[in-house]
Amino acid sequence: MRVGPFRLGLIDKRGNHRQPATGENRQLSNSSCKQAERKGSLAVARSERKEAGTVVGIEWEDFGRVFRECGHDGAAAGVLLMSQLWIVYRQLAEIEEMARSKKVITREEWEKKLNDAKVRKEDMNKLVMNFLVTEGYVEAAEKFQKESGAEPDMDLGTIADRMAVKKAVQCGNVEDAIEKVNDLNPEILDTNPQLFFHLQQQRLIELIRNGKVEEALEFAQEELAPRGEENQCFLEELERTVSLLAFEDVSNSPVSELLDMSQRLKTACEVNAAILTSQGHEKDPKLPSLLKMLIWAQGQLDERAVYPRITDLSTAKLEDHAV
Protein backbone atom coordinates (compact mmCIF):
# COMPACT_ATOMS: atom_id res chain seq x y z
CA MET A 1 0.00 0.00 0.00
CA ARG A 2 1.34 3.40 -0.92
CA VAL A 3 1.51 5.63 2.13
CA GLY A 4 2.66 9.23 1.86
CA PRO A 5 3.42 11.84 4.50
CA PHE A 6 0.08 13.53 3.95
CA ARG A 7 -2.12 10.51 4.36
CA LEU A 8 -1.62 7.58 6.65
CA GLY A 9 -3.52 4.37 6.07
CA LEU A 10 -5.44 2.12 8.41
CA ILE A 11 -4.11 -1.04 10.06
CA ASP A 12 -6.36 -3.55 11.81
CA LYS A 13 -5.48 -5.74 14.79
CA ARG A 14 -3.97 -8.42 12.53
CA GLY A 15 -1.69 -5.95 10.80
CA ASN A 16 -3.79 -5.94 7.62
CA HIS A 17 -4.58 -2.74 5.76
CA ARG A 18 -8.14 -1.59 5.31
CA GLN A 19 -9.81 1.43 3.77
CA PRO A 20 -11.45 4.04 6.00
CA ALA A 21 -15.23 3.88 6.24
CA THR A 22 -17.17 6.72 4.67
CA GLY A 23 -17.86 9.47 7.17
CA GLU A 24 -15.40 8.09 9.70
CA ASN A 25 -14.66 10.64 12.37
CA ARG A 26 -11.45 12.41 11.48
CA GLN A 27 -11.41 14.94 14.30
CA LEU A 28 -8.99 12.96 16.42
CA SER A 29 -7.49 14.50 19.54
CA ASN A 30 -4.39 13.13 21.23
CA SER A 31 -6.44 10.92 23.57
CA SER A 32 -8.73 9.67 20.81
CA CYS A 33 -5.71 8.88 18.63
CA LYS A 34 -4.34 6.63 21.35
CA GLN A 35 -7.73 5.01 21.81
CA ALA A 36 -7.98 4.39 18.07
CA GLU A 37 -4.54 2.83 18.06
CA ARG A 38 -5.55 0.47 20.86
CA LYS A 39 -8.47 -0.59 18.71
CA GLY A 40 -6.05 -1.27 15.89
CA SER A 41 -6.69 1.65 13.62
CA LEU A 42 -5.16 5.01 12.94
CA ALA A 43 -6.55 7.63 10.57
CA VAL A 44 -4.90 10.94 10.01
CA ALA A 45 -5.62 13.27 7.08
CA ARG A 46 -4.49 16.72 6.07
CA SER A 47 -7.14 18.57 8.10
CA GLU A 48 -6.35 16.53 11.22
CA ARG A 49 -2.65 17.37 11.12
CA LYS A 50 -3.52 21.02 11.19
CA GLU A 51 -5.13 20.74 14.62
CA ALA A 52 -3.47 17.60 16.00
CA GLY A 53 -1.32 17.73 19.09
CA THR A 54 -1.60 20.13 21.98
CA VAL A 55 1.84 21.20 23.11
CA VAL A 56 2.21 21.59 26.87
CA GLY A 57 5.12 23.40 28.43
CA ILE A 58 6.63 24.95 25.30
CA GLU A 59 7.86 28.48 25.88
CA TRP A 60 7.31 30.18 22.54
CA GLU A 61 9.25 33.16 23.88
CA ASP A 62 12.35 30.93 24.04
CA PHE A 63 11.85 29.82 20.47
CA GLY A 64 11.07 33.34 19.33
CA ARG A 65 14.33 34.50 20.81
CA VAL A 66 16.15 32.47 18.17
CA PHE A 67 14.40 34.30 15.34
CA ARG A 68 14.50 37.76 16.89
CA GLU A 69 18.25 37.64 16.47
CA CYS A 70 17.44 37.90 12.74
CA GLY A 71 20.73 36.42 11.70
CA HIS A 72 21.86 33.28 9.93
CA ASP A 73 21.76 31.25 13.16
CA GLY A 74 18.03 31.85 13.53
CA ALA A 75 17.37 30.90 9.92
CA ALA A 76 19.56 27.80 10.26
CA ALA A 77 17.61 26.67 13.32
CA GLY A 78 14.39 27.18 11.38
CA VAL A 79 15.65 25.14 8.43
CA LEU A 80 16.59 22.30 10.79
CA LEU A 81 13.16 22.37 12.41
CA MET A 82 11.40 22.31 9.04
CA SER A 83 13.64 19.53 7.77
CA GLN A 84 13.05 17.54 10.95
CA LEU A 85 9.28 17.87 10.52
CA TRP A 86 9.41 16.68 6.92
CA ILE A 87 11.70 13.73 7.64
CA VAL A 88 9.61 12.66 10.64
CA TYR A 89 6.55 12.46 8.39
CA ARG A 90 8.38 10.53 5.70
CA GLN A 91 9.91 8.13 8.18
CA LEU A 92 6.58 7.64 9.94
CA ALA A 93 5.01 6.62 6.63
CA GLU A 94 7.87 4.31 5.69
CA ILE A 95 7.76 2.23 8.87
CA GLU A 96 4.05 2.26 9.58
CA GLU A 97 3.84 -1.41 8.66
CA MET A 98 6.46 -2.24 11.30
CA ALA A 99 4.25 -1.15 14.20
CA ARG A 100 4.98 -4.27 16.24
CA SER A 101 8.71 -3.54 16.55
CA LYS A 102 10.69 -0.32 16.75
CA LYS A 103 13.13 0.50 14.01
CA VAL A 104 16.50 1.88 15.11
CA ILE A 105 17.73 4.81 13.02
CA THR A 106 21.30 5.92 13.63
CA ARG A 107 22.34 9.55 13.82
CA GLU A 108 24.30 9.13 10.59
CA GLU A 109 21.25 7.79 8.76
CA TRP A 110 19.00 10.50 10.21
CA GLU A 111 21.37 13.35 9.38
CA LYS A 112 21.62 12.07 5.82
CA LYS A 113 17.85 12.20 5.56
CA LEU A 114 17.88 15.74 6.95
CA ASN A 115 20.49 16.80 4.43
CA ASP A 116 18.45 15.27 1.61
CA ALA A 117 15.34 17.24 2.65
CA LYS A 118 15.24 20.44 0.62
CA VAL A 119 13.73 23.47 2.34
CA ARG A 120 13.87 26.62 0.25
CA LYS A 121 15.56 29.53 1.97
CA GLU A 122 12.88 31.87 0.62
CA ASP A 123 10.15 29.85 2.33
CA MET A 124 12.04 29.82 5.60
CA ASN A 125 12.58 33.57 5.42
CA LYS A 126 8.85 34.10 4.86
CA LEU A 127 8.07 32.06 7.97
CA VAL A 128 10.52 34.07 10.06
CA MET A 129 9.16 37.37 8.74
CA ASN A 130 5.58 36.25 9.37
CA PHE A 131 6.48 35.44 12.97
CA LEU A 132 8.18 38.79 13.53
CA VAL A 133 5.44 41.02 12.10
CA THR A 134 2.58 39.05 13.66
CA GLU A 135 4.18 39.18 17.12
CA GLY A 136 5.03 42.85 16.61
CA TYR A 137 8.83 42.87 16.56
CA VAL A 138 9.15 45.88 14.27
CA GLU A 139 12.88 46.55 14.62
CA ALA A 140 13.71 42.89 14.19
CA ALA A 141 11.49 42.71 11.12
CA GLU A 142 13.16 45.74 9.57
CA LYS A 143 16.61 44.30 10.22
CA PHE A 144 15.63 40.90 8.89
CA GLN A 145 14.16 42.51 5.77
CA LYS A 146 17.48 44.19 5.02
CA GLU A 147 19.51 41.03 5.65
CA SER A 148 17.31 38.50 3.88
CA GLY A 149 15.36 40.53 1.35
CA ALA A 150 12.12 39.00 2.65
CA GLU A 151 9.15 41.33 2.30
CA PRO A 152 6.65 41.61 5.18
CA ASP A 153 3.05 40.76 4.37
CA MET A 154 1.81 43.90 6.12
CA ASP A 155 2.71 47.56 6.46
CA LEU A 156 5.32 47.81 9.22
CA GLY A 157 3.92 51.23 10.10
CA THR A 158 0.68 49.66 11.34
CA ILE A 159 2.53 47.37 13.75
CA ALA A 160 3.51 50.21 16.09
CA ASP A 161 -0.12 51.19 16.72
CA ARG A 162 -1.08 47.55 17.33
CA MET A 163 1.81 47.07 19.75
CA ALA A 164 0.86 50.26 21.61
CA VAL A 165 -2.54 48.71 22.36
CA LYS A 166 -0.98 45.43 23.44
CA LYS A 167 1.54 47.19 25.69
CA ALA A 168 -1.20 49.27 27.34
CA VAL A 169 -3.11 46.13 28.32
CA GLN A 170 0.04 44.42 29.58
CA CYS A 171 0.77 47.45 31.76
CA GLY A 172 -2.77 47.47 33.16
CA ASN A 173 -3.85 50.64 31.35
CA VAL A 174 -7.04 49.16 29.98
CA GLU A 175 -8.92 52.43 29.48
CA ASP A 176 -6.03 53.72 27.37
CA ALA A 177 -6.00 50.47 25.39
CA ILE A 178 -9.73 50.75 24.63
CA GLU A 179 -9.26 54.33 23.38
CA LYS A 180 -6.40 53.25 21.14
CA VAL A 181 -8.44 50.38 19.69
CA ASN A 182 -11.31 52.75 18.90
CA ASP A 183 -8.87 55.15 17.26
CA LEU A 184 -7.63 52.32 15.03
CA ASN A 185 -11.07 50.96 14.16
CA PRO A 186 -14.21 51.49 16.29
CA GLU A 187 -15.87 48.47 14.65
CA ILE A 188 -13.42 46.08 16.33
CA LEU A 189 -15.12 46.39 19.71
CA ASP A 190 -18.59 47.09 18.30
CA THR A 191 -18.59 43.77 16.46
CA ASN A 192 -16.79 41.73 19.11
CA PRO A 193 -18.76 41.76 22.38
CA GLN A 194 -16.61 39.02 23.90
CA LEU A 195 -13.43 41.02 23.41
CA PHE A 196 -15.04 44.16 24.84
CA PHE A 197 -16.26 42.21 27.87
CA HIS A 198 -12.79 40.76 28.47
CA LEU A 199 -11.27 44.24 28.31
CA GLN A 200 -13.83 45.49 30.82
CA GLN A 201 -13.19 42.43 32.96
CA GLN A 202 -9.47 43.22 32.88
CA ARG A 203 -10.28 46.77 33.93
CA LEU A 204 -12.21 45.38 36.91
CA ILE A 205 -9.27 43.14 37.79
CA GLU A 206 -6.94 46.15 37.80
CA LEU A 207 -9.26 48.04 40.16
CA ILE A 208 -9.25 45.07 42.53
CA ARG A 209 -5.48 44.76 42.23
CA ASN A 210 -5.10 48.40 43.27
CA GLY A 211 -7.40 47.97 46.28
CA LYS A 212 -10.18 50.18 44.93
CA VAL A 213 -12.95 48.00 46.31
CA GLU A 214 -15.88 50.45 46.17
CA GLU A 215 -14.97 51.60 42.69
CA ALA A 216 -14.60 47.98 41.59
CA LEU A 217 -18.06 47.05 42.89
CA GLU A 218 -19.66 50.09 41.25
CA PHE A 219 -17.92 49.37 37.95
CA ALA A 220 -18.98 45.71 38.04
CA GLN A 221 -22.60 46.62 38.74
CA GLU A 222 -22.90 49.36 36.13
CA GLU A 223 -20.70 48.08 33.28
CA LEU A 224 -20.45 44.30 33.54
CA ALA A 225 -23.60 43.08 35.27
CA PRO A 226 -25.91 44.13 32.39
CA ARG A 227 -23.76 42.14 29.97
CA GLY A 228 -23.83 39.19 32.31
CA GLU A 229 -27.62 39.21 32.22
CA GLU A 230 -27.46 38.80 28.44
CA ASN A 231 -24.79 36.11 28.37
CA GLN A 232 -24.41 33.24 30.83
CA CYS A 233 -20.69 32.83 30.11
CA PHE A 234 -20.09 36.50 30.83
CA LEU A 235 -22.02 36.17 34.09
CA GLU A 236 -19.89 33.25 35.22
CA GLU A 237 -16.67 35.10 34.41
CA LEU A 238 -17.94 38.18 36.26
CA GLU A 239 -18.78 36.10 39.35
CA ARG A 240 -15.30 34.57 39.31
CA THR A 241 -13.71 37.99 39.10
CA VAL A 242 -15.82 39.58 41.84
CA SER A 243 -15.09 36.62 44.12
CA LEU A 244 -11.56 38.01 44.45
CA LEU A 245 -13.04 40.58 46.85
CA ALA A 246 -14.07 37.84 49.26
CA PHE A 247 -10.46 37.01 50.17
CA GLU A 248 -8.13 39.11 52.26
CA ASP A 249 -5.21 37.17 50.83
CA VAL A 250 -6.04 36.72 47.17
CA SER A 251 -3.00 34.50 46.65
CA ASN A 252 -4.90 31.77 48.51
CA SER A 253 -8.11 32.22 46.54
CA PRO A 254 -9.15 29.65 43.95
CA VAL A 255 -9.16 32.38 41.27
CA SER A 256 -5.83 33.99 42.16
CA GLU A 257 -4.60 33.40 38.60
CA LEU A 258 -6.74 36.35 37.50
CA LEU A 259 -4.19 38.65 39.13
CA ASP A 260 -1.23 37.00 37.42
CA MET A 261 0.60 38.77 34.62
CA SER A 262 -0.43 35.85 32.40
CA GLN A 263 -4.03 37.12 32.58
CA ARG A 264 -2.94 40.50 31.23
CA LEU A 265 -0.99 38.77 28.47
CA LYS A 266 -4.00 36.62 27.59
CA THR A 267 -6.20 39.68 27.18
CA ALA A 268 -3.49 41.56 25.28
CA CYS A 269 -3.07 38.67 22.84
CA GLU A 270 -6.83 38.55 22.28
CA VAL A 271 -6.83 42.25 21.39
CA ASN A 272 -3.80 41.81 19.14
CA ALA A 273 -5.54 38.97 17.27
CA ALA A 274 -8.71 41.03 16.81
CA ILE A 275 -6.77 43.95 15.34
CA LEU A 276 -4.91 41.65 12.95
CA THR A 277 -8.18 40.09 11.81
CA SER A 278 -9.73 43.52 11.22
CA GLN A 279 -6.74 44.37 9.01
CA GLY A 280 -7.20 41.25 6.92
CA HIS A 281 -4.23 39.33 8.37
CA GLU A 282 -3.99 35.96 10.06
CA LYS A 283 -4.29 36.34 13.81
CA ASP A 284 -1.61 33.77 14.66
CA PRO A 285 1.91 33.29 13.26
CA LYS A 286 2.47 30.14 11.19
CA LEU A 287 5.62 29.07 13.00
CA PRO A 288 4.03 27.87 16.28
CA SER A 289 1.55 25.74 14.33
CA LEU A 290 4.41 24.07 12.46
CA LEU A 291 6.20 23.40 15.71
CA LYS A 292 3.09 21.84 17.21
CA MET A 293 2.93 19.67 14.12
CA LEU A 294 6.57 18.67 14.64
CA ILE A 295 5.97 17.70 18.28
CA TRP A 296 2.92 15.66 17.31
CA ALA A 297 4.74 13.93 14.45
CA GLN A 298 7.70 13.05 16.66
CA GLY A 299 5.29 11.63 19.22
CA GLN A 300 3.78 9.39 16.58
CA LEU A 301 7.19 8.23 15.38
CA ASP A 302 8.39 7.61 18.96
CA GLU A 303 5.97 4.69 19.14
CA ARG A 304 7.51 3.07 16.08
CA ALA A 305 11.21 3.96 16.01
CA VAL A 306 14.27 5.06 17.95
CA TYR A 307 15.87 8.03 16.21
CA PRO A 308 17.61 11.37 16.91
CA ARG A 309 14.89 13.82 17.94
CA ILE A 310 14.57 17.49 18.81
CA THR A 311 13.54 18.01 22.42
CA ASP A 312 14.55 21.64 22.92
CA LEU A 313 12.86 23.82 20.31
CA SER A 314 14.85 26.89 21.31
CA THR A 315 18.11 25.28 20.16
CA ALA A 316 16.80 22.78 17.56
CA LYS A 317 19.57 20.32 18.50
CA LEU A 318 19.23 16.64 17.75
CA GLU A 319 19.45 14.34 20.76
CA ASP A 320 20.01 10.59 20.54
CA HIS A 321 17.44 8.30 22.14
CA ALA A 322 18.63 5.41 24.24
CA VAL A 323 17.74 2.09 22.59
Image: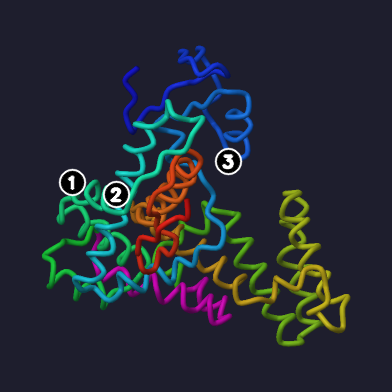
Q: Residues within 10 Å of mark 3 (few under 14, many from 20)?
A: few
Identify the secondary structure beneath mark 3. Answer: helix
The residue mark sitting in front, 1 or 3, is 1
Along the polypeptide, which appears first: circle 1 or circle 3?
Answer: 3
Q: Which quadrant holds the N terminus? A: top left
Which secondary structure type mostly characterizes the magenta part of the structure? Answer: helix
Q: Is residue 156 left or right of residue 250?
A: left
Q: Tell me if residue 176 is in the magenta stretch.
A: yes
Which residue is denoted by mark 2 in the rendering?
Answer: 110
**Mark 2 to mark 3: distance in Å?**
26 Å
Which residue is denoted by mark 3 in the rendering?
Answer: 30
The residue at 28%/74% (across/down) is 138
Tell me the amino acid under the disc marked 1: Asp
> Residue 317 is drawn in which quadrant?
bottom left
Q: Is residue 218 left or right of residue 119?
A: right
Q: Which residues are magenta?
A: 154-179
Q: Position of residue 76 (x, y in %)?
A: 23, 64
Is 137 drawn above or below residue 150 in the view shown?
below
Q: Position of residue 150 (x, y in %)?
A: 15, 62
Q: Is residue 92 left or right of residue 124?
A: right
Which residue is denoted by mark 1 in the rendering?
Answer: 116
Q: Is residue 112 left or right of residue 264?
A: left
**Mark 1 to mark 3: distance in Å?**
30 Å
Q: Position of residue 9 (x, y in %)?
A: 43, 22
Closest to the observer: 18 or 44?
18
